[in-house]
Amino acid sequence: MLFARIMNEGKFIYESCSIGGQMVRKNGEIIFHDPVSKTSAFLISIYEHFEFDYPRFFKMDDLSKLGWLASEILLKGQDGIRNCNPEKIGVVLSNANSSIDTDLKYFDSLSDTPSPSLFVYTLPNIMIAEICIRNNFKGEGVFFISERFDEKFMAGYVNKLLDSGKLEFCICGWVELFQGAFQAVLFLVGNSPGKGGQLFSADQMIEIFKIQ
Amino acid sequence: MKDVFVSTCNIFSPLGKTSAENFLQLKRGISGVRLYTDSLLSAKPFYASLFDEGDDFPIDPPIFHTRFEKLLIGSIREALEKSEIDPGHPKTGMVITSTKGNIGLLETRPLSRDLIDRIALPTSAGLVSRYFGFKNPPVIISNACISGLLGIIVALRMIRGRDYEHVVVAGADLVTRFVLSGFQALEALSPLPCVPFDADRAGINLGEGAATIILTGNPKYSDGVRVLAGSVSNDANHISAPSRNGEGLGQAIKTALWDSGLSAHDIDLVSAHGTGTPYNDEMEAKALNLNGLHHAPVNSLKGYFGHTLGAAGILESVASICSLKENLILPSMGFKRSGVTVPVNICTSLLETPLRNLLKTASGFGGCNAAVAYSKN
């Protein structure tokens, strides 16, 4: 029900990307499949498959790697947004367990020498920072925590950011990772009708979310 | 744009359990920060503002709430008691903010899937929500040190979106070995009480606390202060270091002022993030200068409360709203001479002066920045 009244027409999902179930999908189509590799190895195999060249990637924790990879694949073919004012591009993400995977790794390091580099990743919004640093996005970033992907809240919140003119483009979605189980579903949303894509709505997001 | 008012507030800190108690201590120049030697938390002594170990924040009925949840409940309860707002009303919402919530349970309980679920913030927010009988699901934000201020901005939008009439925004964080060791590993802790913006500043002190601010779209529940606007930005520069030029925070301040219809000259008080680290305070001073705010009185409340992390934006907003109401600017504790490279007007003594417009800022790991403007009617 949140913001239901302002969920009007005129916003589009230009692209979607999901990573999970040993697959990577772009706009619903499987573009990569690795039935064997486990979490960390699977993330690296995606990186290698798409021939990314970004050494920072290897410094990230697995949660940030997952979100970063999904954002890279999401943004492929959308070079037009590079012309947009960076202050008008935002990232609104969510998950249920924050940075728990890295929290446990950091906590383990306490018995020896606490790792400052791991500690920084014990905040889920660092993933947003990684995406912003890569793309020079300077608009609003928010990390919400919810038990499951709250498509209605997310649609309402992102709609309001676009309606108010605060943002022209927004990456939104869900990125969760904990001990071998992970899922990322990201959407690139904006309000320029010329770019095509599907209408942005809570229902449309959840339809895409369910394809796994 | 629809007016959004502050209804009631609470600060629940080692200095007191109500905003009135806390503000009284601030006016007296009393700080919660002191030296601790607690081997369970840290091998070395450290300065922080902590609750007494025996302070268990009792709630009635005593169920299975953790210390973190009881802290939130204690803060929300007092704010709700003072207001006439019904948490069970279909148009009342709740926003919870925290950086690490129940993470301290890792230090006392064996690891299991159940423990992971217990640590997850939706579990805590759900328990707190049920305790008060909220009908709407809680909105939870975990966004480093701007979490609290972001909570206020999100609540503002929830009310302006007209689906909510009232939103209870509450934030809390505890000082755990997990968090303390991390800041120690980053060499970010001050070996002495923190002195934001001062030439001798050497880092932060951590602080425990919770704070609540109830926002309403109904003037009937207003206490005379409005939230005008808020803005959020990202530096896109570094995951743990503040930007060198202050442009990211500068942008958030600029937009918050613009959306408020205020200019730099209208701002009577800036409640800065002012952590006391060399880089943060320098960055903030530059951001203020980028917006022509070098004349505006500025304080940081970290010297009184320490850095209360996910609660800080709410806690420091509430204390500064008390300042607005009493027309009293609090001195920035510990400040003697400027240690930033651009001019800033740091308050050094308790100053009675007419106050109307307040700007609150925050910045955090991940290059995130937020600014909110408040105005007294």
Image (cartoon, coloured by chain):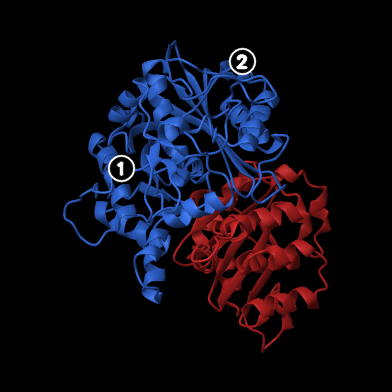
Chain colours: A red, B blue
Q: Position of residue B173 (x, y in %)?
A: 41, 49
State the residue in front, A9 or B367.
B367
State the residue in front, B213 or B46.
B46
Residue identifier under label 1: B75
Identify the amino acid type marked 1.
Ser
Q: Mark 1 lies on which chain?
A: B
Task: Determine the secondary structure under disc 2.
Answer: loop
Q: Position of residue B286 (x, y in %)?
A: 68, 28
Are the residues under badges 2 and 1 in a single subunit? yes
Task: Determine the secondary structure under disc 1.
Answer: helix
Q: Where is residue B174 in the image (x, y as percent from the top left)?
A: 39, 50
Which of the 4 quarters of the picture holds residue B217?
top left
Q: Mark 2 lies on which chain?
A: B
Q: Position of residue B256 (x, y in %)?
A: 59, 32
Q: In this view, does B289 lie to the left or right of B38?
A: right
Identify the amino acid type marked 2.
His
Q: Is residue A178 left or right of residue B118?
A: right
**Sequence-wise first label, 2 or 1:** 1
